[in-house]
Amino acid sequence: MLVTTKAAERMAEIADKVRNGERLSFEDGVFLYRSDDLLTIGQLANEVNLSKNGRKVYFIENMSLYFTNVCEAHCAFCNFRKDQGDEGAYTLTPDEMIAYVEQHIHPGVREFHIVGGHNPHVPFEYYVESIRALKRRYPDVTMKAYTAAEIDFFSRISGLSYRGVLERLIEAGLETLTGGGAEILSDQYRKKMRVEKANIEQYLDVHRTAHQLGLRTHTTMLYGSVESVEERVQHMLHIRQLQDETNGFLVFIPLSMQPISPNAGIRRRNSAFEDLKAIAISRLMLDNIPHIKAYFINIGTQLTQVALTMGASDAHGTIVRERISHSAGALTPAGITREDLIWLIKGAGRIPVERDTFYNEIRVYE
């Protein structure tokens, strides 16, 4: 009973800090992760989100594109990558990608979300021309392309600095970076999971440089494998500190780790409890980032709907066909229609808002 009382007192202290606009500490974040009081955590996150965004929940008409799945890295969690020559390995030319887009695009698409493998068998110019060709063909679609880890890879194969790489890509049509490549910003985690790409400082420095060049970017956290709750909280503090410095992040996206096979049982997957807690705690810890995204690809549409009452203000987008999570064990839809997104958001008692990449409002569905 004493433990319960102390836990309740500690939660009340955190609630007071949140309601008084005081920043939560590392210790506060760890306590929240270890607490089983999901309803209180979710209620506090909901209060914070309502104060920032009201009842509006944002979504975008977008397409996910993947130029290549050939990758020099062998990260333990990735089932998307291939070696050159493997069955199923591919590298699309810009013309081939345009042909794919022509088959699947519809008039409402406002954003291409472009990521892929770190393919060392093509030069940096290939990645530049891929963006240039798409932007030339679809000038009104925002080019949201490449992770910070890909930018670091481009720097290595080109000999250019991060600034030099980004300036070349911006000249070709790049307008924002995706959030991937962060995984968990912990040296211990990255060693255990064989994250053979940008380290903590490199990931942060790419985004810092992008922000200095005027890009607003996205950032993620891939949780639910070998990391500790302390590492999750420290990850958020790395992001929060950079946001204090640059104010360049638009949204934080907690990504629920997928098992390697769609046949994996529930014990190999994050629980709904953990997924909702990740979103709510992200909203409470990241007081300087406007939006927290509920990524239906990883947590499912119904849990996404619940997440909108626990701190999330973004329901992602239509996607058309997602491949990375589904190359592992994701059991969720690979895409969703605008109408279903609107229904999902309204079902949570929220107001759907179609947005562009930068959260400018296109249409409000009252």
Image: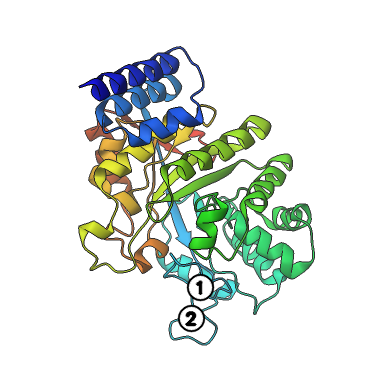
Quote the CA–CA distance across marks 2 and 1.
Answer: 6 Å
Q: Residues within 10 Å of mark 1 (few under 14, many from 20)?
A: many
**Residue found at x 26% / y 24%:** 3
Q: In the figure, 3 relative to 234: above or below?
A: above
Whole-percent x and y of residue 354?
A: 41, 38
Q: Residue furthest front?
A: 2
Q: Secondary structure at mark 2?
A: loop
In the rendered image, which quarter is residue 305 located in? top left
Q: In the figure, 345 relative to 301: above or below?
A: above
Residue 14 image label? none
Q: Earlier in the sequence, mark 2 or mark 1?
A: 1
Whole-percent x and y of residue 294?
A: 37, 42
Along the viewing direction, whichever of 15 and 159 lies nearer the viewer: 15
Residue under numbered circle 1: 69
**Residue found at x 26% / y 18%:** 5
User: Which residue type does callout 2 highlight?
Assistant: Ala
Q: Is residue 181 visible?
A: no
User: Which residue type does callout 1 highlight?
Assistant: Asn
Q: Does the residue at mark 2 contact the one at mark 1 (Cβ under 8 Å)?
A: yes
Q: In this rendering, would 110 be left or right of 281?
A: right
Q: Quadrant of the C terminus?
A: top left
Residue under numbered circle 2: 89
Whole-percent x and y of residue 253?
A: 45, 44
Q: Residues within 10 Å of mark 2 (few under 14, many from 20)?
A: some
**Residue found at x 34% / y 53%:** 298
Q: Is residue 170 visible?
A: yes
Q: Secondary structure at mark 1?
A: loop
In the rendered image, which quarter is residue 171 located in? bottom right
Whole-percent x and y of residue 344?
A: 26, 40
